[in-house]
Amino acid sequence: MKEKSQLLRPTDESALALAGLLLSKIRWGALATLAPDGYPLTSLINIAFDRDGRPLMLASRLSDHTTNLLADPRCSLLISDPGKGDPLAHPRLSLTCNGQHITDARETVRYQDIRADFLEHHPKSALYIDFPDFLFFRLDLLGARLNGGFGKAYQLTSSEILSLTACKP
Amino acid sequence: MKEKSQLLRPTDESALALAGLLLSKIRWGALATLAPDGYPLTSLINIAFDRDGRPLMLASRLSDHTTNLLADPRCSLLISDPGKGDPLAHPRLSLTCNGQHITDARETVRYQDIRADFLEHHPKSALYIDFPDFLFFRLDLLGARLNGGFGKAYQLTSSEILSLTACKP
């Protein structure tokens, strides 16, 4: 039987292109946070990227994933859109991150930049983006795993992901 | 500002119907397991149900979620298919579970029943279901959270979920 490490392929141009396609096409993801009882908790979030390509999320202070991230920043985000056929034949990307609460005051340039970046990706969030109980997290990337379908597993660095998501000059 | 507990609505027929629709329509999910480094890990899995309605997953021994579940059964499964529009306006279900490795020998009736139940939901898994490195987990339900869109949150019991997924006589 093969060892796990043998299953990882070297990250090449086509793997990066596939990860880039997922990141440009899909604007939502399954976030896993750590609940106080020690269990992971999955929830659906909208994803945007700041100008440096770092993932952003907007969440209500009343949601469990917000409570979890404020207590423990460790999280994982699955980006995938299985569509038709065997879901496992579709590509997907798991990002390992630390969720950092954006604590800047709302009138600051930095907060307004983040707000603008988020709105650009999610125009419909204008309905709730300014609610007082909503807050932003930046998901600081530690690494990523790309699964391109059966037998096509790659490990990507945070720099490789950021090179795909950052604004091109 | 509202307290969290005030946001949960009492589980009524329409909430159960919505959960039932998600569970009957969607055959894949985002699984969160606990990695050895303490971070959660999200990955894509195919979902089936046994005759009693308990979720089943088939996984390769070489995948990280298998390693994680064998070391720590705590997991969470997000079932959702956002489609068009604001993803957060779409319903989704988070199941909290313990993943139990099915250790019965392959020739036993119990294993063959599970295999048949899985194949019924995922005919295409016939391509790999009998590979020696593939194994089944039953996801024993502890509870569920249904989010039916903005402001529509419900807590469901494992019995309520099983009443939706079990084979009707």
Image: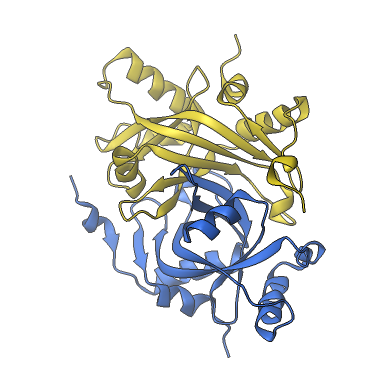
Chain colours: A yellow, B blue
Which one is in front, A24 or A161?
A161
- Say whether residue B118 is left or right of residue B31: right
Determine whether A122 is above or below B4 in the image: above
Which residue is pictured at 48% across the width and 77% down the height? Answer: B162
Q: Quadrant of the C terminus of chain A?
A: top right
Determine whether B153 is above or below A113 in the image: below
**Position in image of residue A150 (x %, y %):** 76, 49
Report how many numbered discs are placed on residues in the image: 0
- Say whether residue A115 is left or right of residue A108: right
**Position in image of residue B82 (x %, y %):** 55, 49
Which residue is pictured at 41% across the width and 73% down the height? Answer: B158
**Position in image of residue A76 (x %, y %):** 49, 41
Residue found farthest to the bottom: B169
Asked if residue A24 shows in the view, the reply is yes
Q: Quadrant of residue B51?
A: bottom right
Q: Quadrant of residue A58?
A: top left
Asked if residue B78 shows in the view, the reply is no
Which residue is pictured at 53% across the width and 53% down the height? Answer: B68
Which residue is pictured at 33% across the width and 42% down the height? Answer: A66
- Say whether residue A149 is left or right of residue B52: right
Residue found farthest to the right: B127
Q: Quadrant of residue A75?
A: top left
Q: Quadrant of the N terminus of chain A?
A: bottom right
